[in-house]
Image (spheres, rainbow, N blue to C red):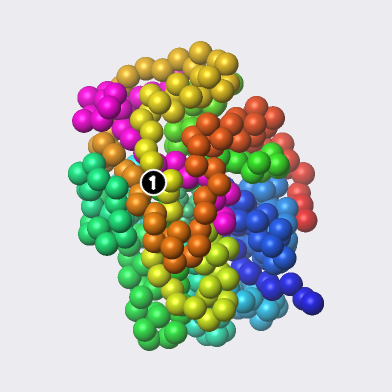
Amino acid sequence: MAEDEILVVGGAGYIGSHMCKYLRRRGYRPITLDNLVCGHRAAVQWGPLIEGDIGDRAVLDRIFTGYDIKGVLHFAAYTSVPESVADPLKYYRNNVASTVCLLQAMVAHGVRPLIFSSSCATYGDAGGKALTETHPQQPATPYGRTKWMVEQMLDDFGAAYGIRAVSLRYFNAAGADPDGRIGEDHRPETHLIPIILQTALGQREFLSIYGEDYPTRDGTCVRDYIHVEDLAQAHHLALVRLLDGGAGGKYNLGNGDGFTVREVLDRARKITGETIPARIEARRPGDVPMLIGACEKAMSELGWRPEFCDIDAIIQTAWDWHRRHPDGFADRDKGGAAG
Ligand SMILES: NC(=O)c1ccc[n+]([C@@H]2O[C@H](COP(=O)([O-])OP(=O)(O)OC[C@H]3O[C@@H](n4cnc5c(N)ncnc54)[C@H](O)[C@@H]3O)[C@@H](O)[C@H]2O)c1
């Protein structure tokens, strides 16, 4: 029997490439569309890579006519919160306007199931409580607003054109492929765990800790870290539901538990055996003290069972990747597309 072909836009990126590996294992054929602005050619190992932009209708038409696409997983976006504040145009154009082009093409070609990478950045301040999906949507940054706008667009496109969408609101994606073939390689890197591990490798002089006077147990910010493989599992469950004709929805994806920056640093020091120097710096604008997701809805409605609930396991898989690939995909990217 032919494998179901799934279009993965942004499949050369961190989460998208792990998704492709997961899909392949489950018997699908992931077709990656990525403009490689942030992604890596060498991360695409489980299906073809089409180099192109989701804002390019011609390339989308070629894909939807050339492949038998059953559903779309949408990871393609710019992802830096501070950059979105400095250059909102870039974010609205790519994350929102280009998504309109993708949705238009899906409608035109009669492809309805879509899973969208949303974010906890769509929520307003929770005042230290775990966020449920019903918490008000009051994004504090242009990045968060782009995600919330797309979620709203998906509701409208559902009502008018029959698009069936699941929006998955990730907390902090972390960790790497347990087999060590792919991992996190953002340039520049803005996420805490890879920055800590790059410091452990001596690639950075020290870790900057932004603020130690937050109302948290040790004064540093608390975040909810969720393993990239567990994100992939949730996407797969949502995809199966949509392919079986089920309804869309909006779900938090996190571990429901938070760790302070200092706690993550301490765990990483134990796992790596390195000192990992750190310096306290001023607070950054836009950082909230605590972001933790209540994720029972994804568990009860999608049957999601995260496997990497332990922060040590998350850091360990990331460390295995960073230690073996200190330059990330840099060398292999030059060698041409795999798979
Ligand atoms: N990493 C996290 O912690 C996190 C948290 C919440 C939400 N998200 C969302 O998850 C998604 C994936 O995040 P990531 O960390 O893997 O990011 P990433 O930058 O590693 O991956 C995004 C991929 O999309 C591609 N891309 C961007 N714009 C494109 C376009 N117009 N056309 C084609 N390809 C395009 C990039 O080249 C890149 O390969 C993003 O939508 C992000 O907003 C990530």
Q: Is residue 58 above or below residue 73?
A: below
Mark 1, residue position: 256
Q: For residue 197, what is the image quadrant? A: top right
Left or right: residue 69 compared with residue 309? right
Residue 292: where, in percent of width, then height? 34, 45
In the structure shown, which secondary structural element does the residue marked by tag 1 occupy? loop
Image point (22%, 59%), residue name: 136
Q: Is residue 90 above or below residue 149?
A: above
Q: Amino acid at mark 1?
A: Gly
User: Label 1 crowding class (10 Å Cα cut-off): few <14, some 14-19, many 20+?
Assistant: many
Residue toward you, 71 or 48: 71
Q: Is residue 32 above or below residue 85?
A: below
Query: What are the residue bounds of the magenta stretch?
Result: 205-233
Q: Quadrant of the N terminus?
A: bottom right
> Is residue 210 on the magenta stretch?
yes
Image point (33%, 35%), residue name: 222
Image point (77%, 76%), residue name: 2
> Is residue 224 on the magenta stretch?
yes
Q: Quadrant of the C terminus?
A: bottom right
